[in-house]
Amino acid sequence: GFSIAYYGIIIAAGMMAALTAAENGHAVTLLERQGRVGRKLMATGNGRCNLTNHHVSPAHYHGGEGFCDHALAAFDVGNTLLYFAGLGLLTTAEDSGRVYPFSNMAGSVLDVLRYALERPEIDLQTGQTVTAVRKIPEGFSVKTETDTFSARCLILAAGGAAGSKVGGGMDGYRL
């Protein structure tokens, strides 16, 4: 699933959540509805993937005062650029402040994220549409069309309904 901010940071939320959890010592199962991760990411920024904006500010976000302050403070423009540089992605900035991969291709962002997911503590399961989530004493039970998974903790990063042709849907709202 994907989370696209109104102004500035565009991040594949499910992939970033899985990477962050793994980097902090957790075993992760990443369930992807599509046959491959990142389909929606390829359409961002008109196929160029605007990673962030040097002029990012809480004033550019919907949601009321304080809505995104914590997130922007924890993963500001500098941290965003350092993170992607650490994955091997070169970036370039336009005069407007928008930051894109140096290649000007969203595929470059997706490539470094897919490569980063190839670590032993991340089990990527594609083609797994989540149909139900249930709280159980040990954590959560997650049912897909074909399997059932259990986890102590759960991050639901299902994105929004926008971009239905590239994978957007109502799953997150329904769940």
Image (cartoon, rainbow, N blue to C red):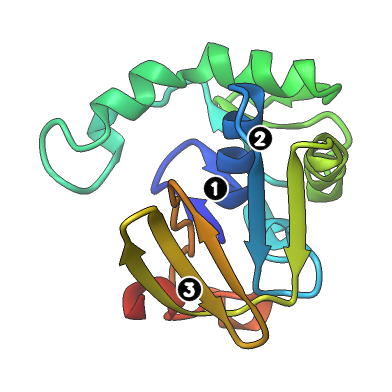
Please report the residue visible at 73 percent of the width from the left and 58 percent of the height from the top: 38
Marks 1, 2: nearer the viewer: 2
- Three-letter amino acid code of the residue under disc 3: Ala
> Badge 3: few (under 14), some or many (20 or more) residues near its Cα, within 10 Å?
few
Q: Position of residue 26 (x, y in %)?
A: 60, 32
Marks 2, 3: nearer the viewer: 2
- Three-letter amino acid code of the residue under disc 2: Leu
Q: What is the spatial separation of the Cα atoms under label 3 and label 1, in whole angstroms?
A: 15 Å
Marking on residue 19: 2
Q: Position of residue 119 (x, y in %)?
A: 83, 35
Q: Which residue is mark 1?
A: 13
- Three-letter amino acid code of the residue under disc 1: Ala
Q: Which residue is mark 3?
A: 162
Image side of residue 30 versus residue 152, left or right: right
For the C terminus, the quadrant is bottom left
Could you say whether the residue bearing mark 3 is in a helix, strand or loop?
A: loop
Please report the residue visible at 89 percent of the width from the left and 36 percent of the height from the top: 103
The picture quadrant where one finds residue 67 is top left
Please report the residue visible at 76 percent of the width from the left and 51 percent of the height from the top: 123
User: Which badge, 2 or 3, is on the more N-terminal residue?
Assistant: 2
Please report the residue visible at 61 percent of the width from the left and 88 percent of the height from the top: 145
Image side of residue 130 versus residue 66, left or right: right
Could you say whether the residue bearing mark 1 is in a helix, strand or loop?
A: helix
Q: Position of residue 154 (x, y in %)?
A: 44, 52
Q: What is the spatial separation of the Cα atoms under label 2 and label 3, in whole angstroms?
A: 24 Å
User: Which badge, 3 or 1, is on the more N-terminal residue?
Assistant: 1
Compare residues 140 and 14 and report the one nearer the observer.
Answer: 140
The picture quadrant where one finds residue 156 is bottom left
Q: What is the spatial separation of the Cα atoms under label 1 and label 2, in whole angstroms?
A: 10 Å
